[in-house]
Image (tube, rainbow, N blue to C red):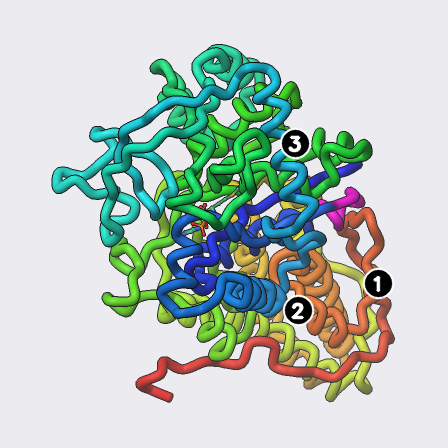
Amino acid sequence: MKSYITTPIYYVNGAPHIGHAYTSIVADIMKRNRTALGMEMMLSTGVDEHGQKNQEAARDLGMQIEPYLDMRCDEFRKVFDLLDVDYDYFVRTSREGHKKAVAHMEQTIFDKGLIVKHAYTGIYCKGCEEFKKESDLTEDGQCPLHPTMKVEQTDETNYFLKMEPFRQKLLDHIEANPDFVHPAAFRNELKQMLSEPLEDLCISRPKERVTLGVDLPFDPDFVTYVWFDALANYLTNIGWPEDGYQDWWAACEHLIGKDILKPHGVYWPIMLMAAGLPLPKRLNVHSHWTGAGGVKMSKSIGNVVDPHEVVEMMGVDALRWYLARHMRADSDSQISVELIRQTYNSELGNKIGNLLSRVAKFSNKNFDGKVPVPGPLTEEDETLRRTVMQAVSGLAGEVAMPDIPARVHVLVTAAEAMNEYIDHQAPWSLFKTEETRERCATVLYVTLDCQRVLFEALAQIIPTSAAKALAMLNAPEVAVPWTPQLDKLAGGTQLGDILALFPRVNAPEAA
Ligand code: ME8
């Protein structure tokens, strides 16, 4: 079975930030989850290279556009590689094949008489690359999403896509497919957006204002509106309009932040309907990260979380873990380097990593470097094994985006149960006398085997550390499709080198 997951393609008017890292990491987690289940996956991420704000960002740095785009594109690729985002396709909207396909889509819609030319007076926000209504603005007349970028009064003749003829059809689709927009809060928000007549969508920009874009196929004085061009990436990545894209398209799920619900929930479905194409399978929407205290992250406040800094300080999995574990489904969540550090030390370090190294080291020293051979199991052993199997079962089926934090949370609960078990069983004491030595071996075995199962599940979230842990246990290769199973770690297996998986990181002032 195929699954095609897309992230937004990010503007290159600045360096990649934690929000970009987040959506691409979540997409990667979903890919790893489904790959483990045996699905055939395609994950696309990348950059949105056109539009006014990218054009102005190059100018502000005094750079020519092409070297500027190459530089930013390289930064995004590098950050996704650093963050273990296992993408299959990296989107650049400057690619010739993409531009050709965008023009084809526009021409198709134009030929159906659904694109019209007329004058328009409106307020433009470069941040959103969108015309705004008075009612969208703050009291002092600014865009609430981009308060530092002045909106501009714009008076232009442009091309417009007729939207209203498709509004009811889209509403009907949302009603008939309750899973089309996920989670429900954003489905309701979208229905609200569609509750009033829709204005035509401006799909062009005159070349006097914007040159960085795809030429409009039916008028050389205009380039295509950046959103029309960018949204089309989801189809052009899989080869549309050439044959062969259909199976992937039917399996397509978009991942987006709540800031771009309208382009994905209104513009894109209507563009597709206008072109006579089917809609994607699902739109997964997430809330945003804010700084500690709920304050918006900004360079001037100094609360921006730089993915590079976090990786350098604590490793990639500290960041992946925090992002996967602490995003709330229905409201914004807080992030700071200090919150990541505390979570890393307390959960990954104290609860998960330390237990593995303690038990593996003890087995290594006292059982000849091998996984101890267990004797008969007790009810307590079975209880722990059930708890762990129950916890990992949450990742042994397809996980929807909003459920990721809860699925990760139960893994922590399972790690806590293992710690309690070990403290209670005290294998270090059991080892001291001959009569209890077999029981000691059993307790160590049960713990190591449960750790193996836990890390097989954690491979979907923190793949680098999970691979190290499984190598320490010299665990057998994980089969695809993955079905968690106990007792796959044979007693007597030679242990690998034992490392500290999550070495403690002190607060900078205490270091
Ligand atoms: O909108 N928390 O690009 P963009 C979580 N080019 N996620 C965040 C975030 C935050 N604080 N800030 C940003 C664009 N994101 C267009 C998209 S798609 C055809 C074109 C993430 O660089 C989130 O996924 O502004 C959000 O939707 C996206 O970055 C916006 O990235």
Q: Is residue 37 magenta?
A: yes
Q: To which residue does mark 3 refer?
A: 104
Q: To which residue does mark 2 refer?
A: 464
Q: Earlier in the sequence, mark 1 or mark 3?
A: 3
Instruction: Name the residue rendered at 52%, 64% in the picture.
Output: 72
Q: Position of residue 55 (x, y in %)?
A: 43, 55
Query: The residue under label 3 is which amino acid type?
Result: His
Instruction: Name the residue rendered at 56%, 76% in the picture.
Output: 502
Ligand 1 lies under 8 Å from the Cβ of mark 1: no
Q: To which residue does mark 1 refer?
A: 477
Ligand 1 lies under 8 Å from the Cβ of mark 2: no
- Could you tell me how many numbered marks the image carries? 3
Callout 2: few (<14), some (14-19), or many (20+) C-alpha neighbours within 10 Å? some
Q: Quadrant of residue 368?
A: bottom right
Residues rendered magenta in the picture: 34-41
The mark closer to the camera, 1 or 2, is 2
